[in-house]
Amino acid sequence: MGTFVLIHGAGSGAWVWHKVAPRLERQGHTVITPDLPGHGRNPRPMAEITLARYADSVCDILRAQSEPVVLVGHSLGGAVISQAAEACPEKIQTLVYLAGYLLRNGESPLDISQTDSESLMMGTAVFSDDQLSATCQPEALQELGYADCSAEDMALVRLLITPQAVAPLSTPVQITAERGGRVPKVYILCTQDKVIGPATQRRMAEVGGCDRLLTLDTSHNPYLSAPQAVADCLLTVL
């Protein structure tokens, strides 16, 4: 049996995995779903939220495990797991990017978004007055990331989604071939994604040296709209 550590994306929290985690656990696996600093039940002042703090929090979890884990990052979580892999590659069996930012050394998520012609994200972003955080225009939220989600799912999203600190989005990852680059990688591409366009996802998977590319015919957040399909993909990684 394996251990999965599932890392959420921007403005989200551990709650996003509430449909996927039980499906993995029923197969006998251990599943850890942390709230990154500043999210969910792990509050932090917006000015203190950084990519490094995210990665450090993930590494704390990895170092507490007796065996290497399957580390999954959704969306912004992709940058987080890459940076965590640079710090503690020996604790990771496989990195899985679920519609996630698989970045080259020196790239940031915002670098990718600004050149992604299929993405609607930059056009729907609303920045706070102090420029420390951003949210999505409420009327654009479902079209942007949840087009195939139910009304019940959307009620949960609107209740729990929060502003996202800008710093982790604008910070370039620092990755070397000898450390983070040596960890095996799998990419799960979402073909109806309007946050990170499918063409951009495919390019990142190819340039990032993924061992496998899997696809889901979903929007950006398939853990809500297609949780069994997500679980099935993850189970093939072990």
Image (spheres, rainbow, N blue to C red):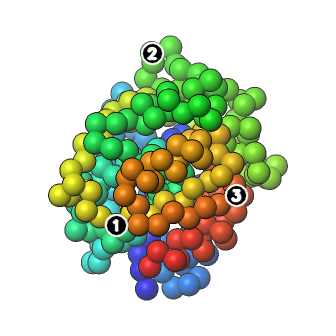
What's under tag 2, amino acid-wise?
Answer: Asp
Quadrant where the C terminus is found in the figure = bottom left
The residue lying furthest to the left in this view is 178
- Left or right for 125, reference 55: right
Asked if the residue under mark 1 is in contact with the one under mark 2, i.e. CB atoms within 8 Å, the reply is no
- Left or right for 117, reference 60: right
Looking at the rendered structure, the secondary structure element under dot 1 is loop
Q: Which mark is residue 184?
A: 1
Q: Nearer the viewer, mark 2 or mark 3?
A: 3
What's under tag 3, amino acid-wise?
Answer: Asp
* Closest to the observer, 37 or 80: 80
Q: In the rendering, at what x and y percent does residue 140 appear? A: 72, 31
Q: Which mark is residue 192?
A: none
What's under tag 1, amino acid-wise?
Answer: Pro
Q: In this view, does 226 lie above or below 115?
A: below
Residue pointed to by mark 3: 217
Cα distance between the residues tagged 2 and 3: 38 Å
Residue 20 can be seen, yes or no: no
* Closest to the observer, 123 or 114: 114
Cα distance between the residues tagged 2 and 1: 39 Å
Q: Residue 130 carries which label?
A: 2
Pointer 1: residues within 10 angstroms few (<14), some, or many (20+)?
A: some
Q: Residue at x 45, y 54 (%)?
A: 205
Cα distance between the residues tagged 1 and 3: 24 Å
The tag earlier along the polypeptide, 2 or 3, is 2
Q: In this view, does 76 lie above or below 22?
A: above
Q: In the rendering, at what x and y percent does residue 153 appear? A: 74, 52
The residue lying furthest to the top in this view is 129
